[in-house]
C-alpha cells in the first residue's frame, strides 16, 4: 500500500532569533519534502519574526502568540493548527539530520502506518564550548509495556518524537503546567493512552548545547519539573512498578536538593511547595518501610541541620 505521507513539524520558539534560521534550514533541506513547518512564536521580543518572514518557503507557517504561555502551550497551538496526520517536533535551537523525515517515513511504512505507535530516535550532542560532537543513545522503551518503562525513567527528547495526530488529540493534548521534563510527561501521556514506543536506533538530530538560555540550565526548574511529574504519576509508579523505583525517584530529587543547595536559596512559593512535597514523600516512605534510604546524606550533620531549619521556617 503506497500512502502519500505528510508531516506536520512544530517548532515552539521564544527569543531564538540568533539561531532559529539554522534550525529552519535543517528542516527545509530535508531529503523528503512533503511536510508543513509550523513555527509557533511564544511572544518573542527579538527579531524572530523578521528572520522567518525573510525565508522564502511556502511550507512554512508562522503563528505569533499575543502572550507568552510557555513551550507546551505553543506546541499545543501547533497541533491544533496542523493540517497533516503525522506530528513531529523540533526545538528552535536544535538541528535535524537531512534524512530524518525519509527514515521516519520508512518506519511508518514498515509498521503499516499504525496510529498507536510512537517513534523516537537517538541523536548527536554538540557541545558548543568544546566544539565537540558525541553520540547519545537513548534507553530502550519496552514496546509492549511502554507506560511502565516510562514511569521508571525520563523519556525521549522532543526533536526525536513522531506520532499520529489522533493519538495526541485522544490524550487531550499536552499538559501545559509542566515546568520542565516536558518531553517525559508528553511521552507518559502518549503511552498511558495506548501509545507503544519504537526506538529508531539512528542519530537523526543534533541536540545543541550552547551558551544561550535553556530550560535544562535552570536547576530550580529542573527540580520543579521532575517533582511535578513524580507527584502526578505517584499512584501509577507504585501500582505498576515497585517500591525501589519510587525510592530511586525520591533519591534523585533529594540529591538535587542538597547538591545544588536549593534549600538555602531564595525560592518562590511554587518551589517551596515542591520541596515540601518531596520531604513529605520521603517521610512517608521511611515510616512505611522502617528504614532510611537516604543514610548516605542524612548522616551528614550539616544536611540534617539544613533540613530542620527549612522545616522550622515553614
Image (cartoon, rainbow, N blue to C red):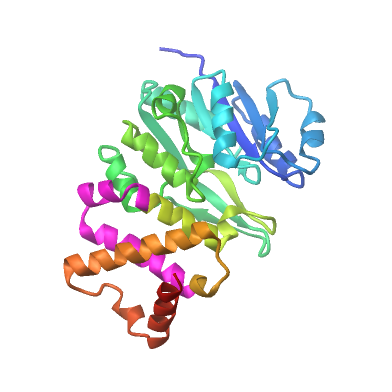
Q: Is residue 217 above or below residue 179?
A: below
Is residue 254 magenta-colored? yes
- Residue 211 lies in what quarter of the image? bottom right
Figure label count: 0
Q: Residue at x 46, y 31 (%)?
A: 173
- Residue 146 lies in what quarter of the image? top left
User: What secondary structure is the magenta-colored segment mainly?
Assistant: helix
Q: Position of residue 215 (x, y in %)?
A: 58, 53
Is residue 190 magenta-colored? no
Q: Is residue 93 above or below residue 168?
A: below
Dividing the image into 4 quarters, which one contains the C terminus? Answer: bottom left
Q: Residue at x 46, y 42 (%)?
A: 121
Residue 277 in view here: yes
Left/right of residue 220 with respect to residue 132 in the rendered view: left
Q: Which residues are magenta?
A: 231-259
Q: Residue at x 46, y 74 (%)?
A: 313
Closer to us: 206 or 224: 224
Q: Residue at x 36, y 53 (%)?
A: 230
Q: Is residue 102 above or below residue 16?
A: above
Left/right of residue 194 with respect to residue 45 in the rendered view: left
Closer to us: 154 or 308: 308
Dividing the image into 4 quarters, which one contains the N terminus? Answer: top left
Residue 222 in view here: no
Left/right of residue 136 with respect to residue 110 in the rendered view: right
Q: Position of residue 137 (x, y in %)?
A: 44, 52
Q: Position of residue 184 (x, y in %)?
A: 43, 46
Amino acid at each position: 500500500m503506497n500512502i502519500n505521507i505528510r508531516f506536520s513539524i512544530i517548532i515552539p520558539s521564544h527569543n531564538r532569533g540568533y539561531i532559529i534560521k539554522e534550525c529552519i534550514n535543517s528542516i527545509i533541506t530535508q531529503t523528503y519534502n512533503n511536510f508543513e513547518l509550523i513555527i509557533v512564536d511564544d511572544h518573542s521580543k527579538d527579531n524572530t519574526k523578521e528572520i522567518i518572514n525573510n525565508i522564502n518557503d511556502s511550507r512554512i507557517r508562522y503563528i505569533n502568540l499575543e502572550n507568552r504561555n510557555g513551550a507546551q502551550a505553543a506546541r499545543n497551538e501547533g497541533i491544533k493548527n496542523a493540517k497533516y496526520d503525522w506530528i513531529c517536533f523540533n526545538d528552535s535551537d536544535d538541528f535535524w539530520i537531512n534524512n530524518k523525515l525519509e527514515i521516519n517515513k520508512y518506519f511508518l511504512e514498515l509498521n503499516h502506518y499504525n496510529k498507536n505507535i510512537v517513534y523516537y530516535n537517538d541523536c548527536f550532542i554538540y557541545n558548543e564550548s568544546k566544539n565537540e560532537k558525541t553520540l547519545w543513545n537513548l534507553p530502550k522503551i519496552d514496546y509492549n509495556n511502554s507506560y511502565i518503562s516510562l514511569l521508571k525513567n525520563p523519556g525521549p527528547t522532543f526533536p526525536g518524537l513522531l506520532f499520529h495526530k489522533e493519538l495526541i488529540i485522544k490524550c487531550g493534548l499536552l499538559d501545559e503546567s509542566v515546568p520542565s521534563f516536558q518531553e517525559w510527561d508528553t511521552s507518559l501521556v502518549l503511552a498511558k493512552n495506548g501509545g507503544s514506543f519504537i526506538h529508531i536506533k539512528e542519530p537523526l538530530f543534533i541536540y545543541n548545547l550552547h551558551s544561550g538560555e535553556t530550560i535544562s540550565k535552570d536547576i530550580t526548574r529542573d527540580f520543579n519539573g521532575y517533582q511535578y511529574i513524580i507527584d502526578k504519576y505517584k499512584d501509577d509508579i507504585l501500582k505498576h512498578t515497585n517500591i525501589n523505583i519510587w525510592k530511586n525517584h525520591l533519591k534523585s530529587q533529594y540529591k538535587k536538593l542538597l547538591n545544588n543547595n536549593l534549600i538555602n536559596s531564595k525560592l518562590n512559593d511554587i518551589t517551596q511547595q515542591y520541596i515540601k512535597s518531596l520531604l513529605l514523600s520521603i517521610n512517608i516512605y521511611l515510616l512505611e518501610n522502617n528504614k532510611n534510604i537516604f543514610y548516605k546524606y542524612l548522616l551528614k550533620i550539616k544536611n540534617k541541620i539544613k533540613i530542620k531549619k527549612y522545616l522550622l521556617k515553614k
